[in-house]
Structure formats: structure tokens, C-alpha cells
């Protein structure tokens, strides 16, 4: 692999490490990518939030969830208005059952910042409405008067599938009253 040779050369650069780490991720070798992304974060990259996001993503994919949470939180700290960072951290925390209310806030902010990005709006509804999380869906549902359309659609589907007709009506029809 040419990228490996460039990344391990004595005169290697941040760009060499980045390319090699990206190739390792593409080859489904996240654990091997972790040290290379970590090097990128320490090398003063042009977009530090993105470097921390990639590092956190590699840690997450490698199963190192606690370390991933720290790195992803750093990405959000450095890029508080970056929908990708907000979305990844929020989704990862919900998947682990960490700070569900705070994570839902992150997902909603990501969705508002990138309303036309289907990968964000679709994923932001998933943790809320997936099976086994009805309490999160109810808390989310009752805390907001009218969610963004993709989330409203997913919440409506969840409400119908679980027999919560009042919630289904509320999300399907703006302004509908709860009975």
C-alpha cells in the first residue's frame, strides 16, 4: 500500500497520515486507523473539529466507546455548529444509553443546522423511535410542540405502530390537540 509507505516515512506529513487512516477505515480496519487519526489531531490540522470527529469515529468503530465519547465531545467543543459532529456524538451516546435528553438536543440541533441532509435528519429520528426506546420517544415527543418533518414522520410511525393514537395524531397533523 503506497499510503502506508508515505505515512511511515521519516518525512511523512499530516496529509500522509490522513490518507493512510482514511484507507484503513475504507478497508474496515478502524483499530489500525486510530493511531493515525490521533497523530492528525496532535498535528494542528486545518479543521480540528473534523480531525477529532474522524478520530472519535475510528475509536467508536473499533469498539472503544469511552474513548470515542471523549474524542467526539472534543469535536463538538471545537465545532459547536458542525452538524456532523453533533449528530455523531448524539447518536453514539443514545446508542449507549448515555444522557439521552442531552443527546436528543444534539440531534435536534444537527437537524436544524442541516435540514436538507438526509443522513442527519434520518439518523436523528432513529434513536428516538427505535424499538425498546418508547420512553425516549415519549419524552422527546412531549417536550416539543412540532418537530422537524423527518422526525415527525418517524415519530408518527412509531406512535401508530405502538398504538399511541393521540401521539400519532399530534405528529401527523400540525396543531392537533392531544386527547
Image: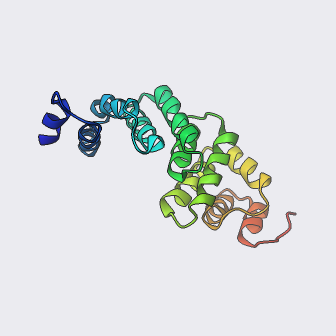
Which color scheme did the rendering employ for the protein? Answer: rainbow
In depth, the one of 135 and 65 nearer the eye is: 65
Q: Where is residue 47 shown, x and y percent of the image?
A: 44, 45
The quarter of the rendered structure image containing the N terminus is: top left
In depth, the one of 55 and 132 nearer the eye is: 55
In depth, the one of 85 and 79 nearer the eye is: 79
Asked where in the image residue 12 lies, by quadrant, the reply is top left
Asked where in the image residue 18 lies, by quadrant, the reply is top left
| Residue 96 placement, left or right of 7 | right
Q: Where is residue 68 shown, x and y percent of the image?
A: 47, 32
Q: Residue at x 65, y 53 (%)?
A: 108
Q: Is residue 1 visible?
A: no
Looking at the image, is 110 positioned above or below residue 1?
below
| Residue 168 placement, left or right of 112 | right
Q: Where is residue 15 shown, x and y percent of the image?
A: 27, 42
Q: Is residue 54 visible?
A: yes
Q: Where is residue 24 shown, x and y percent of the image?
A: 25, 39
Q: Residue at x 67, y 56 (%)?
A: 162
Asked where in the image residue 58 lies, by quadrant, the reply is top left
The quarter of the rendered structure image containing the C terminus is: bottom right
Amino acid at each position: 500500500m503506497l499510503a502506508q509507505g508515505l505515512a511511515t516515512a521519516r518525512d511523512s506529513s499530516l496529509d500522509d497520515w490522513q490518507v493512510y487512516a482514511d484507507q484503513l477505515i475504507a478497508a474496515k480496519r478502524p483499530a489500525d486507523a486510530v493511531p493515525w487519526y490521533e497523530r492528525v489531531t496532535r498535528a494542528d490540522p486545518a479543521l480540528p473539529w473534523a480531525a477529532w470527529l474522524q478520530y472519535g469515529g475510528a475509536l467508536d468503530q473499533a469498539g472503544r466507546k469511552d474513548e470515542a465519547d471523549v474524542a467526539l465531545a472534543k469535536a463538538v467543543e471545537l465545532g459547536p455548529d458542525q452538524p456532523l459532529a453533533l449528530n455523531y456524538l448524539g447518536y453514539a451516546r443514545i446508542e449507549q444509553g448515555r444522557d439521552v435528553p442531552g443527546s436528543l438536543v444534539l440531534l435536534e440541533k444537527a437537524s436544524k443546522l442541516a435540514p436538507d441532509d438526509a443522513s442527519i435528519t434520518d439518523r436523528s429520528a432513529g434513536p428516538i423511535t427505535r424499538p425498546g426506546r418508547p420512553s425516549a420517544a415519549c419524552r422527546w415527543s412531549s417536550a416539543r410542540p412540532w418537530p422537524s418533518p423527518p422526525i415527525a414522520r418517524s415519530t408518527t410511525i412509531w406512535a401508530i405502530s405502538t398504538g399511541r393514537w393521540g401521539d400519532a395524531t399530534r405528529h401527523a397533523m400540525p396543531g392537533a390537540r392531544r386527547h
